[in-house]
Image (cartoon, helix red, strand yellow):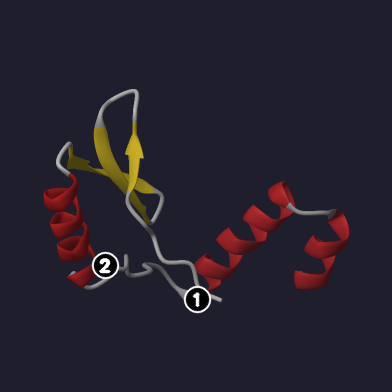
């Protein structure tokens, strides 16, 4: 089931936040206004960063990542 970001209150700061795509957005201290801002953020289309470079460069970058962050067996399987 997909996860949908939900606003949460930080007592230490006294404000509402929502985390969207690994970024926390400060929604302010008022609950009603915070939820209005939350709904506005959720209405915005997702922005994607286009890939740049040739297919070979992208594959090489992927293999570098796998070699550094995954098991040797996984790397060999992808290579």
Q: Which residue is mark 1?
A: 55
- Considering every residue shown, the one lying at the far top of the view is 12
Q: Is residue 41 left or right of residue 70?
A: left
Which residue is pictured at 32% across the width and 70% down the height? Answer: 50
Residue 17's spot in the image, x, y percent?
Answer: 29, 43
Q: Which mark is residue 24?
A: none
Q: Is residue 69 left or right of residue 56?
A: right
Q: Is residue 75 left or right of residue 14?
A: right
Rendered-image quadrant of the N terminus:
bottom right
Task: Say which of 11 and 23 sits in front.
Answer: 11
Which residue is pictured at 38% across the width and 56% down the height? Answer: 21
| Circle 2 or circle 1, nearest the eye | 2
Q: Which mark is residue 47?
A: 2
Residue 42's spot in the image, x, y percent?
Answer: 24, 67
- Considering every residue shown, the one lying at the far right of the view is 73
Do labels 2 and 1 touch, CB within 8 Å?
Answer: no
Q: Secondary structure at mark 1?
A: helix
Which residue is pictured at 26% across the width and 41% down the height? Answer: 16
């Amino acid at each position: 089931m997909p996860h949908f970001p939900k606003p949460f209150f930080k007592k230490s700061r006294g404000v509402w936040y929502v985390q969207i795509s690994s970024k926390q957005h400060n929604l302010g201290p008022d609950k009603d206004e915070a939820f209005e801002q939350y709904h506005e953020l959720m209405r915005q289309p997702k922005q994607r960063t286009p890939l740049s470079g040739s297919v070979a460069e992208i594959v090489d970058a992927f293999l570098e990542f796998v070699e550094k962050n995954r098991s040797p067996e996984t790397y060999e399987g992808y290579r």
